[in-house]
Amino acid sequence: MRSHKFLLSAAAALIMIAAAAVGAMFAFKDDQEETKTLPGYEDSYDSESDDEEWDSTIVENGVRYRLDPDIETVLFLGVDDGGEKSELIAGSGGRADTILLLILDDSKKSMKVLSVSRDTMAEVDAYKTDGSYSYSSLTHINMQYAYGDSPTRSAYLMKKTVSKLLYGIRIDGFFSLTAKGIRKAVDLMGGLEITMPDDYTEIDPRYEKGAKLKLSGEDTERLLRFRDITVAGSNESRVERHLKLIDSVFTGLGGRIGGKNLKKLMDLAGDEAATDLDAETLKKLSDYSLEERMYTLPGSVVEGEDHDEFHVDEEALRKLITGLYYRPEEE
Amino acid sequence: MKRSRLIAGITGLVIMAAGVGLLGYEGASYIRDRKAREKELEAALREPDIRQEEKTELLRETEKAPEAAVNADKEEEQSEAPVQEEKEPYVSKIDFEALWDINTDIYAYIEIDGTDISYPVLQSVTNDGYYLNHTPEGKSGRPASIFTLKADSRDFTDFNTVIYGHNMKNGLMFGKLKEYRDEEYLDSHRTIRIYLPDRELVYKVFAAVVYDDRLITSYYKNDDPEACARYLDSIYGNRDINSHVLKDTEVTEEDRIITLSTCVRGQMDARYLIVAVLTDEIT
């Protein structure tokens, strides 16, 4: 009887001690955190605000907007390599004279075109011949293309620079064509059937507005290379004219090779074309219905030393980008 | 009968165990807090001469004022010092004496007009990361403190003083800074005040940008005007869609600015910066 009671007391005492120890452990558990040194904040992830991802939402006048997940952006570059290409000199890789953003809406199966004037003043990164970064300067955006040592690298540099200009919107891919490439494609097809979208009689008296013509590769290239100086200063109308021309050319090309099949066009152009798009996306560019309205960057032309400079209106540009890419959040 | 006694016995034991466990926890907590407080005091007293000198000097200045510094209620309006021929000595609306009793690492006070952001600013003499994880009272963990690094001087005379604080879920510390993402909010909350024992510094917010996590104090050294200019370029050239830079105030490397820095949820390598330029100094 006595030993029985003793055992019980001993067990009770042990339980008490264990309980006390457990309690104390909990107290010291709080102190487990290490002191992080800056620029730390690594452990702050849990307790940090519950806010959504900053790179896909914006807030304007108290309203929250989300990045539209159905939108894809493809960068089209029409390249003028001026004929001679020297790999030994940095900045000689040609210029991207036609810069178009093709904004695809996968849910609506539609496509918008946003044109970026080649004279747009933007932060361009200069690279040395070995590919290392050299410096940045404010200059014509088409110059960025020159710093690549291959069409793919040049397009990549253009992607970064154009994206930065447009407040960091994601550009999913690119395709580029030189005027020479279009000449090649046209000749391989046996000629380009085109309806002149505007009056281009300063190049050739045959090129009246509305005239239905069949152009050779050389004629097509000359037409696309034409620097329209007649509408001086009025950058928008010049851009619109050029876009209409490109559209006409593509329609002509598409008509001949069966429904604007861009992949076929790219194949025909060979080395004069480059892309990182897969066949599926290339097909979208052909299949999606093109919106009538052509968007251009808001801004104004300022006469520069050698060339005109297009200065973007930042506030209007921001509105344009948020309008194209962001939708009000529905809770 | 025997069974009910057993049940009673076990119940009693459980209750007692819980009680002892609680006692153990409380006891250990107390010891832990005391240890932390001791460490605190130790750090504070590490360079007793400098601190004492500083403290005495500041004490002498405040002693000149006939009235003691008033501990202002946040809701009460700050009364302006009357303009007289004989300039009255500056009296801070912040009771620094009371703050120093809590922690002598407190050297300034920050407020953003129109917000609840109102906190002491600390700087550790020894460990830059200390106040990233400790409150002024020495409690470890969140929400920690609003603080600056040793690289920045404590009198805000540097070109740029970088002030850090956590982006708290509950809106505490710098949790509300993300409201500056909305340009409308930025337009209506332009004033930041820094209180020092002997003056009030008024700053005008001109930029709210999403930045990377580089250590600004070492990347852009305050004693290098070229570096300061480059810092401003990086702010003005920021094109994140959530960034806003107002152009109504021209800021150069000759100005004095402050940069509030906090985290960006979901982007480990990003920081959100609110940059403001000194517009007024009230002494």
Image (cartoon, coloured by chain):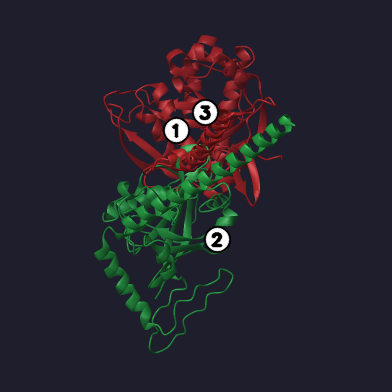
- In the rendered image, what is the letter of the chain coloured red? A
- Give the Cα separation between the discs numbered 1 and 2: 33 Å
What quarter of the picture does the N terminus of chain B occupy? top right
- In the rendered image, what is the letter of the chain coloured green? B
Task: Count residues near mark 1 (Cα–Cα under 10 Å), then give few for <14, some for 14-19, many for 20+.
Answer: some
Disc 1 versus disc 2: nearer the observer: 2
> In the rendered image of this protein, does residue B73 appear above or below residue B141?
below
Quick one: label 3 or label 1, which is nearer the N terminus? 3
In the picture of the structure, the residue carrying the numbered disc 2 is B189
Quarter where residue A295 is shown: top right
Task: Specify the farthest residue to the right.
Answer: B1
At x 36%, y 36%, the residue is: A125
Amino acid type shown at disc 2: His
Question: Residue A71: horizontal and vertical position, in percent?
Answer: 62, 30
The subunit carrying tag 3 is A
Residue B160 appears in the rendering: yes
For the residue pair A8 and A300, the one nearer the viewer reads as: A8
Q: Is residue B147 left or right of residue A327?
A: left
Residue B280 appears in the rendering: no
In the picture of the structure, the residue carrying the numbered disc 1 is A160
Quarter where residue A201 is shown: top right
In the picture of the structure, the residue carrying the numbered disc 3 is A75
> In the rendered image of this protein, does residue B268 appear above or below residue B151?
above
Task: Specify the farthest residue to the left.
Answer: B49
